[in-house]
Image (tube, helix red, strand yellow):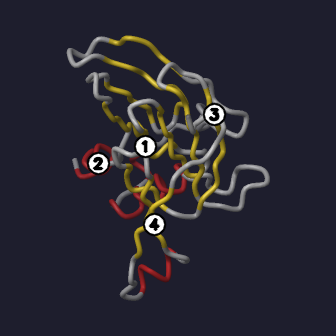
């Protein structure tokens, strides 16, 4: 049905690969990194949710029959997705680190930014958590630079013809720089 199509289009996980062909995956609603080989065998799970992470309420069950149109169902799914700190993606950085990007959804104490980023080692040790940014992370390069889509107001950008800028940044930390 049309409703099944909408639900299947909603992304459920993110993944990236390292140079050794290990596949790192993360679900959007569960703070757990799963590592697979290229045959699909689970090698290990990493990560413990930081204190700021809010999981979806497991008691919520969506009755799709209450939403007769795709638009109404999409609005409800969007509303529900804003009730937890949703994980957007995972990226392997410099073949040494894992970068998780999350949407804060205004649920994180002392955070007025839209996105949060957590940096882990590939072995599962947290390096730094809750890096706050208003900018959407796009990708990284082989040197470890991070690229973001820079803008000041997303809603304004949707109404006008914005001029987008790409920002190039590097993370600096005693734990990272060697």
Q: Tell me, yes or no, whether the two marked residues, 1 and 2, touch with CB atoms within 8 Å.
A: no
What crowding class fits label 1: few (fewer than 14 Cα within 10 Å), some (14-19), or many (20 or more)?
many
N-terminal label among 3 and 2: 2
N-terminal label among 1 and 3: 1
Q: So how many labels did they put on this image?
A: 4
Q: Is residue 167 above or below residue 35?
A: below
Residue of label 2: 9
Residue of label 1: 89
Residue of label 3: 175
- Element under disc 4: strand
What crowding class fits label 4: few (fewer than 14 Cα within 10 Å), some (14-19), or many (20 or more)?
some
Nearer to us of marks 1 and 4 is: 4
- Element under disc 3: loop
Spatial separation of the CA atoms under disc 1 and disc 2: 16 Å
N-terminal label among 1 and 4: 1
Tell me if 53 is positioned left or right of 8 in this view: right
Looking at this view, is 69 or 33 the one in front? 33
Residue of label 4: 167
Nearer to us of marks 1 and 2 is: 1
Spatial separation of the CA atoms under disc 4 and disc 2: 29 Å
Tell me if 14 is positioned left or right of 117 in this view: left
- Element under disc 1: strand
Q: Residue at x 37, y 64 (%)?
A: 71
């Amino acid at each position: 049905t049309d409703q099944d199509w909408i639900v299947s289009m909603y992304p459920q996980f993110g993944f990236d690969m390292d140079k050794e062909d290990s596949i790192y995956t993360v679900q959007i609603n569960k703070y757990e990194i799963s590592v697979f080989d290229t045959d699909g065998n689970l090698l290990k799970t990493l990560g413990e949710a930081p204190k700021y992470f809010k999981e979806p309420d497991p008691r919520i069950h969506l009755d799709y029959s209450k939403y007769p149109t795709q638009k109404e169902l999409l609005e409800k799914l969007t509303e529900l997705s804003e009730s937890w700190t949703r994980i957007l993606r995972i990226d392997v950085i410099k073949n040494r680190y894992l970068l998780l990007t999350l949407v804060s959804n205004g649920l994180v104490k002392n955070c007025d930014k839209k996105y949060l980023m957590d940096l882990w080692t590939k072995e599962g040790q947290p390096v730094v958590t809750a890096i706050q940014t208003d900018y959407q992370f796009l990708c990284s390069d082989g040197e470890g630079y991070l690229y973001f889509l820079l803008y000041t107001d997303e809603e304004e950008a949707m109404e006008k013809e914005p001029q987008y800028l790409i920002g190039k940044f590097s993370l600096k930390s005693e734990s990272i720089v060697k």
